[in-house]
Image (cartoon, helix red, strand yellow):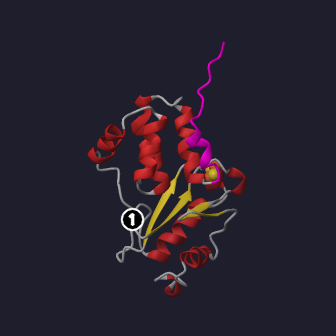
Amino acid sequence: METRPVPPESAVAHVDDPRRRLVDQTLKRFQYRPDALIEVLHVAQEAYSFLGEELLGDIARQLKLPESQVLGVATFYHAFALRPKGEHSCIVCTGTACYVKGAGEIVKVLEAAYGIHSGQTTADGRLTLGAARCFGNCSLAPLLVVDDKVLGKETAEGIAGRVAAVLGNGTPRRESTS
Ligand code: FES
């Protein structure tokens, strides 16, 4: 008889947040196995751009690992950040469905608008740009998550202005020069 992993209660609580859904899908894909910790942390880092305390605690619970062990791993590897790099984050989904619908162009426009590459933070610390694999919401492709707001069915045209509007700071630093 097939035994299916039962998602812990906390996995259901964040179902509307595509970042959280991506982490939950990864946990499920690895059947909540403790040895999936590094992979789960990589996906979480990609989705959120940092590993917050609450998120790490939740991952620990779901993988049935001591929080101290999860924190230890997250601290040990330089690839993981425990604090947000920028005041805000903008994560563009570059999974297949989003990519074929123009996510690559969206990334390019945002990189040009903010004068940084994906994975970097603006010099003033205001925004971190990032890219993540499929958020599991492909019907909204191409989509991006600005802080906790989802922008779906986006286009490269005017995207920098829409991201800036979510951030509440008018137009990005370099948009007016391009
Ligand atoms: S590929 Fe972007 S949400 Fe699935």
Taking depth in this image into account, of 97 and 152 the one nearest to the observer is: 152
Dominant secondary structure, magenta: loop
Taking depth in this image into account, of 156 and 87 the one nearest to the observer is: 87
Q: Amino acid at mark 1?
A: Gln
Q: Residue furthest front?
A: 9
Q: What is the magenta range?
A: 1-16
Task: Residue under label 1, please give it.
Answer: 120
Locate residue 148 relative to residue 45 in the image: left or right.
right
Question: Where does the N terminus fall, quadrant-wise?
Answer: top right
Locate residue 178 relative to residue 53 in the image: left or right.
right
In this orientation, does residue 47 appear? yes
Q: Quadrant of residue 170?
A: bottom right
Q: Is residue 140 above or below residue 163?
A: above
Task: Determine crowd level at label 1: few under 14, some 14-19, many 20+ residues with C-alpha closer than 10 A.
Answer: some
Instruction: State the residue at coordinates (46%, 37%).
Output: 61
Instruction: State the residue at coordinates (50%, 53%).
Output: 47
Q: Quadrant of residue 86?
A: bottom left
The image position of residue 33, as x and y in percent, is: 47, 28
The image position of residue 7, as x and y in percent, is: 59, 34
